[in-house]
Amino acid sequence: MIHRFDALILGGGAAGLMCAIEAGKRGRRVAVLEHADRLGKKILISGGGRCNFTNLYCQPENFLSSNPHFAKSALARYTPADFIALVDKHRIPYHEKTLGQLFCDRSARDVLAMLEEECRAAGVSIFLNTKIQEVARDAEFVLRAANAEFRAPALVVATGGLSIPKIGATSFGYELARQFDLKIREPRPGLVPLVLEAEDRSRYCDLTGVSAEVIADCGGQQFREKMLITHRGLSGPAMLQISSYWKKPQQIQIDLAPGAVPTAVFNDPQTPRTLTTLRSEFRKILPARFADRWLELHAPALWTNPALAHFEQQAHGWSITPAGTEGFEKAEVTCGGVDTDELSAKTMESRKVPGLFFIGEVVDVTGQLGGFNFQWAWASGAAAGRAL
Ligand SMILES: Cc1cc2nc3c(=O)[nH]c(=O)nc-3n(C[C@H](O)[C@H](O)[C@H](O)COP(=O)(O)OP(=O)(O)OC[C@H]3O[C@@H](n4cnc5c(N)ncnc54)[C@H](O)[C@@H]3O)c2cc1C
């Protein structure tokens, strides 16, 4: 059976659905081809089930890409306010959790239901359980599944990244890009917990569950947020954020006492220069178990002013060299992807292959933690949808 459309959208996640809605609203006959048994599985598990669907303070600086300018155009033409207007139209209750991050009050299901409703209103055709075996291009794109063939002059690839393979992530989008001779920036896990070397694991990982506010720094990129000790390493927002910027074998510097000066207490000559005093100061800044452990391993060798200054320096710049990350199984996003040099920043269309578009996470644009990845999915999806 042959199905003919104006545009085929491969992948029914955040970016694919937004693209379909925008194109459908403009009268295009579009089909979303999804290999899973339902749309938007990642939306459903996002934000702990409440979907952090955008960020009020979204700026191009919140994104990583080999070309930091690429995302600007799409982000400017579909803003957080545009998505909030859609959420308001559907009367979905939401709240700002922290740092401009907007979450559903009830459930991520609200966001998916809204997108499905918008697809229905825009006349979008949805094909679930549709596994494309082959993509060819003659006068138009031809996609072959087991029992059907889909044809259209435009093909939008919205198959996402490699993170969380167990809910349907595939490398299909990257393979398709290679098939059409488009460059790929090596995909790697982002927003992912870090694994420590064996020695550091034995030093700290029995403190699993302990968390502290820190500043994590890698290559000049800094995040002041919570760090969490896990049974294999470090996680929590500060470490997830910095993981996207980290590449083996770089070091990460961690300020364990942001804005505090634990040794200042010794400026008073009456204060005894002892480990007990330093421990009680350090416990004011860090959870007691972590403060005690860190002091056991880094206590000043002497109680002289230079030794105390050295200790202070270490507390504000604890250097760790992670062994690696927890990989795509635990990563929230995939960094890297289809090289932005290959695409028009305005429409997401391939420069080499007219009619072929790439949107969302499959492109080499990755958001920081906090609703930015969905904003990129909406913005890049809208950019392509308006160009179809
Ligand atoms: C646990 C978790 C929590 C997250 N929470 C947030 C959050 O709160 N806020 C935020 O901004 N971001 C969050 N993210 C990131 C965000 O979910 C993604 O960046 C976003 O979904 C990317 O949208 P996309 O449409 O490009 O890809 P996806 O949403 O991954 O959609 C891709 C779709 O393509 C389908 N597909 C794959 N291969 C094929 C194929 N061969 N044929 C047909 N279909 C295919 C997939 O089944 C999927 O439906 C989270 C990610 C994870 C893993």
Image (cartoon, rainbow, N blue to C red):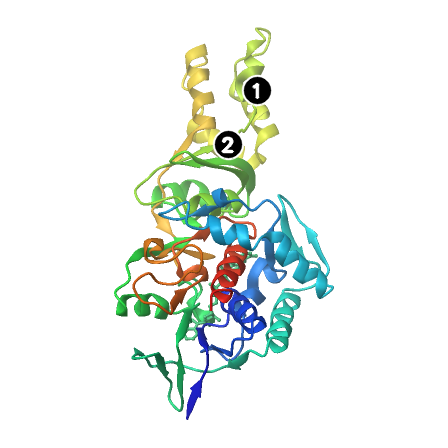
* Label 1 crowd (10 A; few <14 / some 14-19 / many >=20): some
Mark 2 residue's CB less than 8 Å from ligand 1: no
Disc with the residue nearer the chain's start (2 vs 1): 2
User: Closer to the camera, 336 or 219?
Assistant: 336
The single residue placed furthest to the bottom in the displayed view is 1
Describe the element under mark 2 as helix, strand or loop. Answer: loop
- Of residue 2 and residue 292, the one placed in the foreground of this image is 2
Residue marked by disc 2 = 256
Q: Is residue 260 left or right of residue 130?
A: right
Picture coordinates of residue 356, whole percent (x, y): 37, 68
Q: Which quadrant of the view contains residue 172?
A: bottom left
Is residue 192 visible in the rendered image? The answer is: no
Up the image or down, 321 lies above or below 173; here it is above
- Tag in front: 2 or 1: 2
**Which residue is the site of mark 1?**
277
Residue at 47 percent across and 82 percent down: it is 129
Could you tell me which residue is drawn at 71 percent across and 66 percent down? 90
Q: Is residue 188 visible?
A: yes
Left or right: 88, with 358 as reference point: right
Q: Is mark 1 within 8 Å of ligand 1?
A: no
User: Mark 2 belongs to which amino acid?
Assistant: Leu
The amino acid marked with disc number 1 is Thr
In the image, what residue occupies the spot 28% across and 68% down?
Answer: 180
Q: State how far apart marks 2 and 1 are (Cα).
A: 18 Å
